Amino acid sequence: MVKKKYDTMNDIPIGTEMLDKLDDNKKGTLIEVQNFPTMFKVAFEDGKTVMRLTHEVEIVGWSPND
Protein backbone atom coordinates (compact mmCIF):
# COMPACT_ATOMS: atom_id res chain seq x y z
CA MET A 1 0.00 0.00 0.00
CA VAL A 2 1.32 3.44 -0.92
CA LYS A 3 1.46 5.97 1.91
CA LYS A 4 0.21 9.40 0.97
CA LYS A 5 2.08 12.40 2.36
CA TYR A 6 -0.07 15.31 3.47
CA ASP A 7 1.38 18.81 3.47
CA THR A 8 0.14 21.19 6.14
CA MET A 9 0.24 24.98 6.31
CA ASN A 10 3.04 24.56 8.87
CA ASP A 11 5.21 22.85 6.22
CA ILE A 12 5.40 25.87 3.91
CA PRO A 13 9.09 26.76 3.47
CA ILE A 14 10.45 30.14 4.54
CA GLY A 15 10.95 32.32 1.47
CA THR A 16 7.74 31.22 -0.25
CA GLU A 17 6.02 34.00 -2.20
CA MET A 18 2.59 35.07 -0.93
CA LEU A 19 -0.09 37.48 -2.03
CA ASP A 20 -1.75 39.59 0.69
CA LYS A 21 -5.52 39.46 0.07
CA LEU A 22 -6.07 42.36 2.51
CA ASP A 23 -3.72 44.69 0.60
CA ASP A 24 -4.71 44.38 -3.09
CA ASN A 25 -2.75 41.12 -3.58
CA LYS A 26 0.55 42.80 -2.76
CA LYS A 27 3.46 40.35 -3.21
CA GLY A 28 5.49 39.40 -0.17
CA THR A 29 7.80 36.70 1.16
CA LEU A 30 7.16 34.34 4.06
CA ILE A 31 9.64 34.94 6.89
CA GLU A 32 8.01 33.05 9.79
CA VAL A 33 5.21 30.57 10.54
CA GLN A 34 3.50 30.79 13.93
CA ASN A 35 1.24 28.08 15.32
CA PHE A 36 -2.09 27.98 17.17
CA PRO A 37 -3.63 29.53 15.19
CA THR A 38 -1.41 29.19 12.16
CA MET A 39 -0.29 32.65 11.06
CA PHE A 40 2.28 33.85 8.58
CA LYS A 41 4.71 36.72 9.03
CA VAL A 42 5.12 38.23 5.57
CA ALA A 43 7.74 40.79 4.51
CA PHE A 44 7.31 43.18 1.58
CA GLU A 45 9.90 44.96 -0.57
CA ASP A 46 9.11 48.30 1.08
CA GLY A 47 10.32 46.90 4.44
CA LYS A 48 6.84 46.46 5.92
CA THR A 49 6.03 43.18 7.72
CA VAL A 50 2.57 41.94 8.64
CA MET A 51 1.01 38.93 10.37
CA ARG A 52 -1.72 37.19 8.37
CA LEU A 53 -4.03 34.25 9.03
CA THR A 54 -4.05 31.43 6.49
CA HIS A 55 -7.21 32.65 4.73
CA GLU A 56 -5.80 36.20 4.35
CA VAL A 57 -3.01 35.18 1.96
CA GLU A 58 -2.68 33.29 -1.29
CA ILE A 59 0.35 31.02 -1.33
CA VAL A 60 2.12 31.01 -4.70
CA GLY A 61 3.35 27.58 -5.85
CA TRP A 62 2.13 25.51 -2.91
CA SER A 63 1.40 22.47 -2.58
CA PRO A 64 4.37 20.45 -3.83
CA ASN A 65 1.94 17.66 -4.87
CA ASP A 66 0.25 19.86 -7.49
Image (cartoon, rainbow, N blue to C red):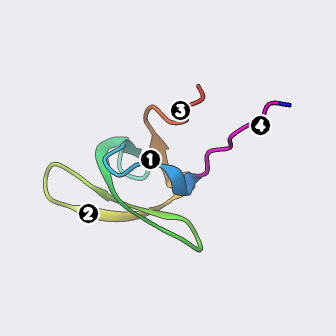
In the image, residue 12 sits, relative to residue 61, either above or below, namely: below
Q: Amino acid at mark 3?
A: Pro
The disc at residue 13 is: none
Return the residue at label 1. 21
In the image, residue 34 sits, relative to residue 26, either above or below, namely: below
Which residue appears at 31% of the width and 43% of the height? 26
Mark 3 element type: loop
Return the residue at label 3. 64
Spatial CA distance of label 1 from label 2 is 14 Å
Sequence-wise first label, 1 or 2: 1
Return the residue at label 2. 49
Sequence-wise first label, 2 or 3: 2
Across and down, in percent, residue 35 comes to 54, 71
Neighbourhood count class around disc 1 (C-alpha, 10 Å): few under 14, some 14–19, many 20 upward: some
Q: Amino acid at mark 2?
A: Thr
In the image, residue 3 sits, relative to residue 47, either above or below, namely: above
Residue span colored magenta: 2-8
Q: Amino acid at mark 1?
A: Lys
Spatial CA distance of label 3 from label 4 is 16 Å
Is 44 left or right of 25, judged from the image as shown? left
Mark 2 element type: strand
Mark 1 or 3: the one toward you: 3
Mark 2 or 3: the one toward you: 3
Across and down, in percent, residue 57 comes to 47, 49
State the residue in front, 57 or 22. 57
Sequence-wise first label, 1 or 4: 4
Mark 4 element type: loop
Spatial CA distance of label 1 from label 3 is 22 Å
Which residue appears at 29% of the width and 47% of the height? 28
